[in-house]
Amino acid sequence: MILLDGKALSKQIKQEIKTEVDALRKSGGNIPHLAAVIVGDNPASESYVKNKVKSSDEVGFESTVIKKDANISEEELLEIVDSLNKNSDVDGFIVQLPLPRHIDPDKIVLAIDPQKDVDGFHPFNFGSMAQGLDAYLPATPYGILLMLERYNIETEGKEVVVLGRSNIVGSPISILLSRKGNPGNATVTITHSRTKDLDSVLKKADIIIAAIGRDRFVKSHQVKEGVVIIDVGINRISDPSRKKGSRLVGDCDFDDLQNTASHMTPVPGGVGPMTVTALLLNTLKAAKNK
Ligand code: GUN
């Protein structure tokens, strides 16, 4: 089995980004500036934002974090979004999800200027992506495309099964892999909680993309020999043998699948670092477009 090492690949792509940023600095160009808004103290969100800022620093971007208490009002958050939209020093920004329950995430995403929406969550970018027009691609699907491309995994004519239909992963990756292009030209099936006979759908898959948030859900007996597994899940399970008392696992049972899959992403160290790298590429694009 070939390990799809997102950590190593993202290190390589970050080096490529850094080279571009160094050249921009030398020529007096616009240095990319990424801002992140985080609300509340969800430990997973804090860790994701920390990684995004660390990676921005590594490639020579400027970065700003705006951290707000969980009790911030929707109006106040909308004002922050508006000020970031208007701030010409900031090339792109994200509002880390999930948000507290009293804030409507759709309203917040709609308020982001599509030109600065480096998460690719705004319907303008989603619609442009779906029509094959220039757009900021959502970071996780973009990271998956980069991984398939750099590992030379052919998608044309392949059966791809996507588990999960979220707006940020399942739905956009299905569109991207079925559209014309490379990676693309695949026959894509989206599955979800109402899918009947998931096993027979999974068994046909040449490539499985799992994004359902259920720990070690996909097992070897459900898949074809030689399948490519892209595991987007990040689930914390208890593990008394670890100092922390827990560890992270994906939506696919890595240990069980390693003799059946031809290629597989680990969790952690697979799709996660690629998502961050894709966000950096979107921010670089935003800075160049300015
Ligand atoms: N929450 C989980 N994934 C993401 C992401 O890619 N961007 C933002 N803003 N929030 C998230």
Image (tube, helix red, strand yellow):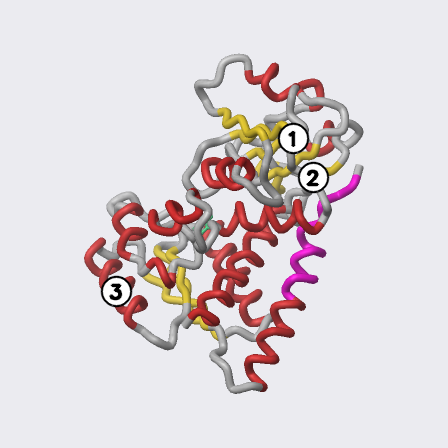
Location of residue 23 with respect to 255 vertically, above or below: below
Return the x and y of residue 115 as percentages of the image width and height. 37, 62
Return the x and y of residue 22 as percentages of the image width and height. 61, 79
Q: Earlier in the sequence, mark 3 or mark 1?
A: 3
User: Which residue corresponds to the image point at 37% horizontal and 45% vertical from the top-left?
Assistant: 127
Q: Are marks 2 and 1 in contact (CB under 8 Å)?
A: yes
Q: CA distance from mark 2 to mark 1?
A: 8 Å
Dot 1: element: loop
Question: Mark 3 sits on what residue?
Answer: 82
Dot 2: element: loop
Question: Mark 1 sits on what residue?
Answer: 158
User: Which residue corresponds to the image point at 60% horizontal and 52% vertical from the top-left?
Assistant: 274
User: Which residue corresponds to the image point at 37% horizontal and 66% vertical from the top-left?
Assistant: 66
Q: Residue furthest left?
A: 75
Question: Mark 2 sits on what residue?
Answer: 154
Return the x and y of residue 234 as percentages of the image width and height. 56, 41
Q: What segment is highlighted magenta in the picture?
A: 2-14
Badge 3 amino acid:
Asp
Ligand 1 is within 8 Å of the C-beta of the residue at disc 3: no
* Label 3 Cα neighbours within 10 Å, binned few <14 / some 14-19 / many ≥20: some
Q: Are marks 3 and 1 in contact (CB under 8 Å)?
A: no
Q: Is residue 285 left or right of residue 150?
A: left
Residue nearer the viewer, 70 or 54:
54
Q: Earlier in the sequence, mark 2 or mark 3?
A: 3
Dot 3: element: helix
* Label 1 Cα neighbours within 10 Å, binned few <14 / some 14-19 / many ≥20: some
Q: Main secondary structure of the magenta part?
A: helix
